[in-house]
Amino acid sequence: MTTVNTKLNRRSFLKVSALAGGGMVLSFSWLAGCKPTPEETLGMPKEWFELNSYIKIGENGAVTLYSSSPEFGQNIKTSMPMILAEELDVDWKNVMVEQGNFDTNRFQRQFAGGSQSIRQGWTPLRTAGATARAMLVTAAAQTWSVPQSEITTASGILEHKGSGKKAHYGEMASLASTLEVPEKVDLKARKDFKIIGTSKKNVDVQQIITGKPLFGLDYKVEGMKYASIIHPPAFGMRLKSFDGDKAKAMPGIQDLFTIKVYNEDFVRSFFDVVTFPELLVIVGNSTWEVFQAKKEVKVEWEKAPESNFSMRGFGGGEPSTITVPEGLENTVDHRSKMEIVAKNSARVVRRDGDPESAFKKAAKVLERTYTAPYLAHNTMEPANCFANVGDEQAEIYGPTQWPEPISAALADRLGLPKDKIKINLPRMGGGFGLRAYSHHLLEAAVISQKIKAPVKMVYTREDDMSYGIYRPTYSATYRAALDENNQLLAFHVKAGGIPESPLHANRFPAGAIDNYLAEGWEIPSNITIGAFRAPRSNFIAGAEQSFLDELAEEMGKDPIEFRLELLKRAETNPVGENNDYDPKRYAGVLELVREKSNWNNPPADVHRGVSAYFCHNSYVAEVLDLKMEGSTPKVENVFAAVDCGIVVNPDAAANMGEGAIVDGIGNAFFGELGFENGAPTKRNFDQYRMIRQKEAPKNIQVHFVENNEDPTGLGEPLFPPVFAAVANALYKATGNRLYDQPFQPKLEEMSNLLM
């Protein structure tokens, strides 16, 4: 049992107010609401209230939890209520869950990203549930004139065994709402969990499979217009002129005009990324009519000059000037620039010992360079947003992982106070980091204000894929110094990209090697980039873990044993003080995956690779088996070991892990976006290769380390290790190491040479 203070910060964590029709309302800074529609629950209370940021208990014992964190498939809309229900001691079938809307006055963090939702909600959610339970117990004790310590709770029932008295929560909710919130409450010990650690189905599953409106694209109002944008065909270009007369003459088309997305003097936040600040907009009576008319607009583009804007960093603070270079960039030029910069001196991020001297006296130096291209997010749901902007208020309904940053941009651009802008949060048809950048909400709002009518703005797939915001292109060079006995003397990583470096200087193997050097570099670009599932880790993990495998082979060691030796050193005699991982937990997932995959006795007909990585506060190790069918690799099995602390919803967690693994395999083999004269070379799925169902692994096993650690990240950590597991298995299968992603083109080239 753990005792916690209910007041966790400067805000009052919990407040209580009475419902007119009886019942208790528990104000909670992570939750918000609309109206419930569950099945197999208690009926609705006689009076029901829609109050933002509240947990509600009706007079009949029903409980409604309104989830504030945006949902895009990571299942937090189910898992977060499970945490609350556990401490509340309520029957899960009597819990109703609804998505809340954006409200900074009540919520501290309405952000789905960084695999942090469960981690950051863990203690607040438990505290909210436990506090409600404690107040209900107090109400029952006063009503029955018995000691609180003699009252037990279970499945929403209060009981005093000595007197035989019982009541469901709703019967005590009205009195409980008048009581003082206790300053401290006791949280359950893990051994007493009844809901956490059990598998519950997605609370939206019935709506999803029956096609009920949940997504931004589903939202409609009577009389709304439809709009789509036309943006420059290449990065480094801007609008010069257009002729839209033919398009405007087409059936259903209302207007054609340009918009500026931001005001010129607006200071952007870190997530206010807009690729093209001026757009051409076409408005009509249906999406189909608008899309057809777009094809008839004659547009003249010109090269854009270098430009600047002000932006605050991720943590806020004073703004800095961001320069957008001029020019039309090409993938060929990107590669040559990265090769040149990678050979020159770079910014030293970490240095342990004297790596330069160690390399000079080395008997052998192993050096390898790894690269990866730009990647597009390719969410199933293209960018879209409904907006209805009036003179005094605005309503927005669109997919976003983080509404708070765009709210400031909306207020500035629309000239409205923030509290007059309502942002509703639909379920998203994919996110992967892309929807943290909510330019589409701003664009729709500006269009609505311009036409003085409600509007649904929708991107075509080509718009969505060619707009940005991409995973950067990266390069990393690793070097290892070995002595005459093949022992490791020094380790050096120099990593960079366009336009950011993927380097995580304080992660493994930092802390395990006496002489260690980490350097980073960047090359400016006008191609807009942003968070992509496990930012930076999604490349550097593959490079690092591929190099460690090759280094282990050079040293004559088993790849898992080699990693465990390094981790043992980091545990018993660490180098430096800034190592951001726990070597014991890191080693734990390697040992677990070794056991679960039967590493030392693999099937005779498969080739296997291993990889492990720490990111988003979690540890993952993966073993991947593949076989070659002619020149085509087929992934047979993937074994994953995960230490993400306590697992709230096991089936949902395993599903998320499986999805990350399949996504990683697909990107490792096929993911690639190139540029010619500033234009993306792939604009739809007929060109941009995604993994197909027949290419997915035949068997995926996700195993979780059992411990009492608080939950950490899960949506992203299983993604980065896959790339190296694929590469290391391919080496075993082909005898050739692959250093440049994606791997499939190289495999085809190798096959052609053998024919």
Image (cartoon, grey):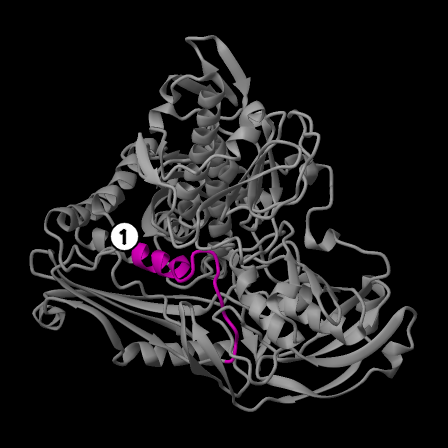
**Quadrant in which residue 96 is drawn:** top right
Q: Position of residue 27 (x, y in %)?
A: 52, 44
Q: Position of residue 108 (x, y in %)?
A: 47, 55
Q: Is residue 510 left or right of residue 719?
A: left
Q: Nearer the viewer, residue 659 or 635?
A: 659
Residue at 27% in and 52% down: 549
Residue at 72% in and 69% down: 392
Residue type at the position of mark 1: Asp
Up the image or down, 576 lies above or below 179; here it is below
Asked if residue 534 lies in the magenta stretch, the reply is yes
**Quadrant in which residue 743 is drawn:** bottom left
Q: Position of residue 464 (x, y in %)?
A: 64, 65
Q: Is residue 259 left or right of residue 572?
A: right
Q: Position of residue 125 (x, y in %)?
A: 45, 40
Circle 1 residue: 549
**Quadrant in which residue 414 is drawn:** bottom right
Q: Nearer the viewer, residue 243 or 710?
A: 710
Residue interval drawn in magenta: 526-546
Asked if residue 221 lies in the magenta stretch, the reply is no
